[in-house]
Image (cartoon, grey):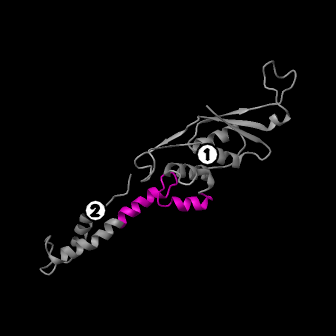
Amino acid sequence: MAAPNYSAADFLRAFQALMPRGRVWPREPDAVMTQVMSGLVQSYARITARSNELLVDAFPATSVELLPEWEATLGLPDPCAGESPTLQARQRQVVARLTNSGGQSLQYFIGYAKNLGYIVTVTEFTPFRAGQQRAGSPCGTQDWAFTWQINSQLNTVTSFRAGQSGAGEPLAAWGNAVLECELSAIKPAHTYLNFAYH
């Protein structure tokens, strides 16, 4: 249930209901008292609307005005997102970092990429060993034991959405810089991470 948004007219009626009765307290629309109150209640209506928006803005996935504070808390913005990231990309990056509980499993990296807005799969490699691989298998060295690969679409498109995008943003944005930068930062230090796009 959403918080009520009271209009200036609602506040004017409430103010007039609290006034004493009598000829010196007129309630007609053209009375000076009503006009003065009409000017005052604009602030109350504006403050009520802003506090209701604060409820939505307090959550990182829907935050707009408090987004810079969320980003500052999490060490964002960083070079991963480029010079002018979209609002959706910024929100996703905040949510991904905020909900990041750490891990080294394949599911962890797939889930982290999903929080960033990317659908990925993971390929693991092994060094070539006689008796374990068969003809046609890649001939990898010992380093292949520490190599893994993120497979993703070449162009993951983020479309402009009313209510989720900001003014002046492009109708579509794409690129995998955030995916590569974020996953490279959290990968296990002893591993080599490749990215493959299809």
Query: In this view of the protein, which residue sits in the foreground, 24 or 190?
Result: 190
Judge whether residue 136 is colored magenta: no
Range covered by the magenta-colored residues: 47-76
Q: Nearer the viewer, mark 1 or mark 2?
A: 1
Look at the picture and state if 85 lies above or below 24.
above
Q: Is residue 70 visible?
A: yes
Q: Amino acid at mark 1?
A: Ala
Residue at x 62%, y 56% (from the top left corner): 78
Q: Main secondary structure of the magenta part?
A: helix
Residue at x 70%, y 46% (from the top left corner): 184
Give residue 113's position: percent from left, percent from top: 61, 42
Secondary structure at numbered mark 1: helix
Dot 2: few (<14), some (14–19), or many (≥20) neighbours within 10 Å? some
Give residue 2's position: percent from left, percent from top: 38, 54
Judge whether residue 55 is colored magenta: yes
Residue labelled with disc 1: 177
Q: Amino acid at mark 2?
A: Ser
Give residue 40's position: percent from left, percent from top: 28, 73
**Residue 7 marker:** 2
Give residue 37's position: percent from left, percent from top: 23, 74
Dot 1: few (<14), some (14–19), or many (≥20) neighbours within 10 Å? few
Of the residues under marks 1 and 2, which one precedes in the sequence?
Answer: 2
